[in-house]
Amino acid sequence: MQEEKSQKLWGGRFETKAASIMERIGESVSFDKRLYKQDIIGSIAHAKNLLKIGILTKEEFDSIVTGLMQIKTEIELGQFHYTTELEDIHMHIEHRLTHLIGQAGKKLHTGRSRNDQVAQDVRLFIRDETNEILESILRLLDVILKKASDNQELVMPGYTHLQVAQPIRTSHYLLAYFWAFERNFKQLQHTLEVNDILVLGSGALAGVNYNTDRDLMLEELGLRALSDNSIDAVSQRDHILNFLFAASLILVHASRLCEEIIIYSSVEFGFISLPDSLTTGSSIMPQKKNPDIAELIRGKSARVIANLNHMLILLKGLPLAYNRDLQEDKISLFDSVDQVKISIEGITEMIREMKFHPEKMQNSLNRGFATATDLADYLVNDKKIPFREAHEHVGKLVSLCVQRNRTLVDIEESDRASISEHFVGESYFAAISLPNSTEKKNVYGGTASVRQKEQLKKAENSLANLRQSLQAEK
Ligand code: ARG
């Protein structure tokens, strides 16, 4: 009997062993073992506090730290033994520690509950992972900048309703994603401000019966502020929600980009191609080269958005304070962390490696009458024709082009002249020219080449600032 009860940390109160179903449904170690590093760091900070308030002697403290370090090594070398008899990583570490160092190990949980322990570990985990994700966004932004800088002169079709709308510089298109991911970066930094809070000292929910020095642990763990309410501290999961929302927005941006990569690399568009190394073939159709990476990331966005929903739904009906439902909060968090990281890496590689096909872009621009608006604006500016009338003239010309299966570039001069006397001569060709069209979009934030240079400069500065701010946090 004694042996049967021995593993549980609440052995005193319980006569019989947990049923198999209790153990299987109750265990979280199969996934929360990912928190081992944070658990050990958190325990050392807690032990420092216990030393300061006289619960631990210096010898006991030292043996706890040595024991925890040994456990860390065992885990990292794959030598640590996991069992579902011990619910979670927190119990595993404490159990092993006591086995290694004896009595002192049994003192570690003084003035602490797994409720504040797990809440703290997850916050530390979010901080560590967010910092890695921020680094990976910097790499992505860098690649986008480079690609944009190399493609300022390449004019491509811009779309609305997925119908050719107006010519844009390819740099302009790429920089649209630069700013999207730059916002993601800043949003993640903001989530850290709310995340990096010390909750240790909250105990199970009411605080603890010891003279716990929370400021010491705050300092030790490099956190920003103390939680103000112990009930809130152990029951809220806003830091996870914030992360999951930020992750969802990253994947929404990534998924839109992927959708375009998929479309633009089809035979029908043919604007870009990905290298063999980033595509897959088909087991039956020899000609196929599929943009699987882009499709997978588009698919992953569903999962990451679902994880945010999972967390919102998990929380919405929970009474304060801790409820065991919360054990499953880590599943969505871990999954989103993994999916965000691999997706950012995937789009970074796709952007780095993609090749553009200018002829295909030019063809779509011409066949899509991309400079029709410019032609109307020419009638307005140079010929003083009211815009509505100009719009109609150009509409008629486009319609005639469609009838004749021509573009604005190659429709016969006689056909043009039949609609307007202004559609003849050099000034007509200047009005429908692709580079001229982009050059005229010379407002701040527009697609003209001076504005591209200006925007690139601004993006570069912004990237340097982001880099610096990340450095400063370390
Ligand atoms: N395994 C639990 C979790 O991950 C740890 C906290 C358990 N607390 C409790 N009161 N049973 O949420």
Image: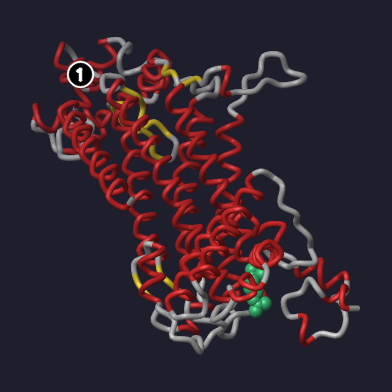
User: In which quadrant of this rendering is ligand 1 seen?
Assistant: bottom right
What residue is shown at x 86% (from left), y 85% (from top)?
15
Q: In this view, does 2 lie to the left or right of 26?
A: right
What residue is shown at x 81% (from left), y 85% (from top)?
14
Quadrant where the N terminus is found in the figure: bottom right
Q: Is residue 196 visible?
A: yes
Q: Which of 95 and 269 is in front in this view?
A: 95
What residue is shown at x 49% (from left), y 53% (from top)?
248
Tell me if residue 431 comes above or below residue 245 in the rendering: above
Tell me if residue 383 comes above or below residue 410 in the rendering: below
Residue 293: horizontal and vertical position, in percent? 58, 32
Residue 279: horizontal and vertical position, in percent? 60, 23
Task: Return the residue at label 1.
Answer: 423
Q: Is residue 286 left or right of residue 395?
A: right
Q: Which of 176 and 130 is in front in this view?
A: 130
Identity of the amino acid at label 1? Answer: Phe
Quadrant assignment, res 266: top right
Q: Is residue 377 visible?
A: no
Residue 205: horizontal and vertical position, in percent? 54, 85
Quadrant assignment, res 316: bottom right
Quadrant assignment, res 289: top right
Residue 112: horizontal and vertical position, in percent? 55, 78
| Residue at the extreme right | 1
